[in-house]
């Protein structure tokens, strides 16, 4: 696939909870290799949008097109499709009763039925990439928050996804651990992974994003390159928000 090709598209996506419309006709295209950062106030619908992208959240109307296939029309294959859409959460969600290398190996072997030795080889390369090779036989409880998140990222990558979704990957971390996780994400970006990242880290967003989406009240209010949107926001709402954040 070429870089300009759309990998994932939200078409008129709407989602309500208890009759409250939290996502309002969102249209969004993520291109192959693109890094899109979603920014917006608390409760504006950022996590919900991410969760809609792999149908972890059922949508009320609209469609999600991933690799030219409608997820709505392919709901019965959704587990297979989700193998290609990695997700990294605020709270890591590691398997506490498994050691680190087994955390990475579990899904590729159990779900994708991949060969043990091949997965092991890949897992070790990824652990090296996140600089935690020496922790391969440790258990999650023996790791710091920053280390756990780096493992969670390596685990997602071990599935060989086509896109990675991050929902505030550093917001549960102590400040001194934020940088090590952001550095790992930057490294993966350099490798060409397509990513959608929800974050409140403005400096990081500025550095990493090809495009920033500012959402408020379930709608895309403004989208632009980081340089444009931070220095010259077009809407009053974005301007007010960035003034508070920067
Ligand atoms: N499972 C749910 N049931 C009911 N309401 C929900 C549910 N999930 C989200 N909401 C509501 O939908 C709105 C959007 O929530 P969402 O978690 O997507 O916001 P967010 O932008 O990620 O916020 P934050 O920055 O605090 O993480 C909020 O009003 C929230 O209360
Ligand atoms: Mg959220």
Image (cartoon, rainbow, N blue to C red):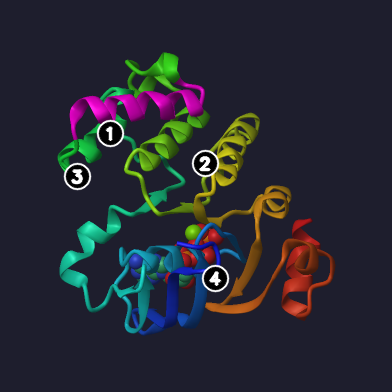
Tell me, yes or no, whether the highlighted magenta stretch contains residue 126.
Answer: yes
Tell me whether circle 3 and circle 1 mark residues in contact (CB < 8 Å).
no
| Disc assigned to residue 44 | 4
Q: Secondary structure at mark 1?
A: loop
> What is the C-alpha distance between the residues marked 1 and 4?
30 Å
Q: Earlier in the sequence, mark 3 or mark 4?
A: 4
Residue that numbered label 1 is attached to:
95
> What is the C-alpha distance between the residues marked 3 and 4?
35 Å
Give the residue at x 42% y 31%.
Answer: 151
Q: Depth-wise, is mark 3 or mark 1 nearer the camera?
A: 3
Residue that numbered label 2 is attached to:
172
> What is the C-alpha distance between the residues marked 3 and 1?
18 Å
Q: Secondary structure at mark 4?
A: loop
Q: Earlier in the sequence, mark 1 or mark 4?
A: 4
Respond yes or no on whether mark 4 lies under 8 Å from ligand 1: yes
Tell me whether circle 1 and circle 4 mark residues in contact (CB < 8 Å).
no
Q: Position of residue 4 (x, y in %)?
A: 55, 68
Quadrant assignment for the C terminus: bottom right
Instruction: Check disc 1: other Cα within 10 Å, few if <14, some if 14-19, many if 20+.
Output: some
């Amino acid at each position: 696939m070429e870089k300009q090709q759309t990998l994932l598209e939200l078409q008129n996506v709407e989602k309500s909870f208890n009759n409250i419309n939290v996502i309002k006709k969102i249209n969004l295209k993520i291109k192959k290799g693109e890094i899109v950062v979603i920014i917006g106030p608390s409760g504006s619908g950022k996590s919900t949008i991410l969760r809609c992208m792999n149908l972890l959240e059922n949508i009320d109307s609209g469609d999600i097109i991933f690799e030219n296939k409608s997820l709505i029309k392919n709901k019965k294959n959704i587990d297979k499709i989700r193998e290609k859409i990695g997700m990294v959460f605020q709270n890591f969600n590691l398997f506490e009763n498994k050691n680190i290398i087994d955390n990475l190996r579990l899904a590729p072997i159990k779900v994708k039925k991949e060969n043990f030795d091949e997965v092991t080889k890949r897992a070790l390369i990824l652990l090296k990439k996140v600089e935690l090779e020496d922790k391969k036989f440790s258990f999650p409880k023996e790791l710091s928050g920053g280390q756990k998140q780096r493992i969670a990222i390596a685990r997602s990558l071990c599935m060989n996804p086509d896109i990675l979704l991050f929902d505030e990957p550093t917001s549960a971390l102590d400040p001194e651990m934020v940088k090590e996780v952001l550095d790992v994400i930057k490294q993966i970006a350099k490798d060409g992974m397509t990513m959608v990242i929800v974050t409140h880290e403005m400096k990081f967003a500025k550095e990493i994003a090809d495009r920033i989406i500012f959402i408020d009240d379930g709608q895309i209010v403004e989208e632009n390159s980081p340089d444009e949107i931070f220095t010259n926001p077009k809407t009053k709402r974005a301007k007010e928000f960035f003034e508070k954040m920067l």
